[in-house]
Every structure is written in structure tokens, then in C-alpha cells.
Image: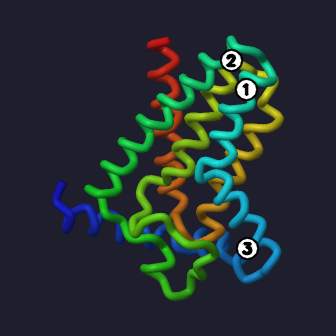
Amino acid sequence: MNPLKTSAVFARIDAVELSLCLACNRGCHRKRIRQFFAVISRLGDGVFWYSLMAVLPIVFGAAALRASVHMAIVALAGLVLYKFLKSRLVRERPFLQHADIALGAAPLDRYSFPSGHTLHAVGFSLVALSYYPQLAWLVLPFAGLVALSRVVLGLHYPSDVLAGALLGALLAWISLTLR
């Protein structure tokens, strides 16, 4: 992919999304909101999902190992996919591009497209729910908060989050189809 063409496309998309980014990022100026979403983001960085994978066999028995391994495979595939895309598409994070967007938590890397946090949140959620639909009350709100946290904290544009969600859903769907 030609980085110059990609950056021109992202510049046009950034301009369209800027007002929504600014509106979401206003929460970053309030300490409690910023702290809340920073904790959600940190938990969504793997802590919540890996804890869930460890707890499933304790709660549901040895048969839940299959679900945990399935989630781990989706996690690995997601990691490879989003790192590959970020290294090729090189979309700068909103707080780097726009001085009006406050940074609410330290980024894991420089680039924003797609959102790896959201990709994993959606992928993990769909796989977990395919085995244990009764966990919807827990994983769906958390996945939504993870996705929202990325924009509130100035780390992603809404399209980064949408792309991450679509890729996570696609990975989960492929893995469930192959199961």
C-alpha cells in the first residue's frame, strides 16, 4: 500500500470525524471520566479477557478449556492482523493530529487504524458468547465500553473502532465456522 495515498484518504476521513472525536474527547477533561475510561481501556488491553479465559474452566468445568483455547487462538490471529494493518496503513492517532484532542491514556503504539482493543473485545465476546450466552450481561457492556474508551481517550477515531469491531467479528465468525 502506498503510504501517501493512504494518508490522503485518512486525512479526508479525519476531517469528517473530527467533530465526533472532539465531542467524545470532552469527557477526558473531567478527571473521573478520564480515569474510568483509562481503567476500562487498560482492562481491555487483555487483563479482562485473559482473566475470563482463566476463570471459564473454574466456573464451567474442564469442558470450558475449549472455549478458552478458542479465545486464545482468536486473540493471536487478531494480534497478527492488527499489527500487520497498523504497520501498513500508518494512520496517526487523533491526539497526534489534532491539538484540541486531549490524550487520556498512554498509547501502546503510534498508529490508530484499526483499533486492536476493539478488535479483541468483539472477537473475544463473540467467541465467549457462542459457548456461554449467559455471559452476555458481562461481556457485551464491557466490550462496548472498551470501544468507547478508545475515542474518549483520544487514541482512536470512530472509524478505527468500527474497523476493529468488524475485523474482530470477522475473525470470530471465521473461527466459529471452522470449529
Callout 1: few (<14), some (14-19), or many (20+) C-alpha neighbours within 10 Å?
A: some
Q: Name the residue type under label 2.
A: Ala
The residue shown at (50%, 37%) is 75
- Mark 1 or mark 3: which comes first in sequence? 3
Residue 89, position in %: x, y? 29, 58
- Mark 2 or mark 1: which comes first in sequence? 1
- Label 3's element? helix
In the picture as drawn, the residue positioned furthest to the bottom comes out as 99
Question: What distance separates the C-alpha of mark 3 from that of mark 2?
Answer: 35 Å
Residue that label 1 marks: 56
The residue shown at (56%, 72%) is 106
Say whether residue 126 is left or right of residue 57. left
Tell whether label 2 touches label 3 (CB within 8 Å): no
Residue 171, position in %: x, y? 46, 30
Question: What distance separates the C-alpha of mark 2 from that of mark 1?
Answer: 6 Å
- Mark 3 or mark 2: which comes first in sequence? 3
Tell whether label 1 touches label 2 (CB within 8 Å): yes
Residue that label 3 marks: 34
Q: Nearer the viewer, residue 135 or 59?
A: 59
Q: Is residue 8 above or below residue 159?
A: below
Residue 92, position in %: x, y? 39, 71
The image quadrant that residue 19 belongs to is: bottom right
The residue shown at (50%, 88%) is 99
Residue that label 2 marks: 64
Say whether residue 34 is left or right of residue 161. right
Callout 3: few (<14), some (14-19), or many (20+) C-alpha neighbours within 10 Å?
A: many
Callout 2: few (<14), some (14-19), or many (20+) C-alpha neighbours within 10 Å?
A: many
Residue 80, position in %: x, y? 36, 42
Q: Name the residue type under label 1.
A: Leu
Say whether residue 54 is left or right of residue 73. right
- Quadrant where the N terminus is found in the figure: bottom left
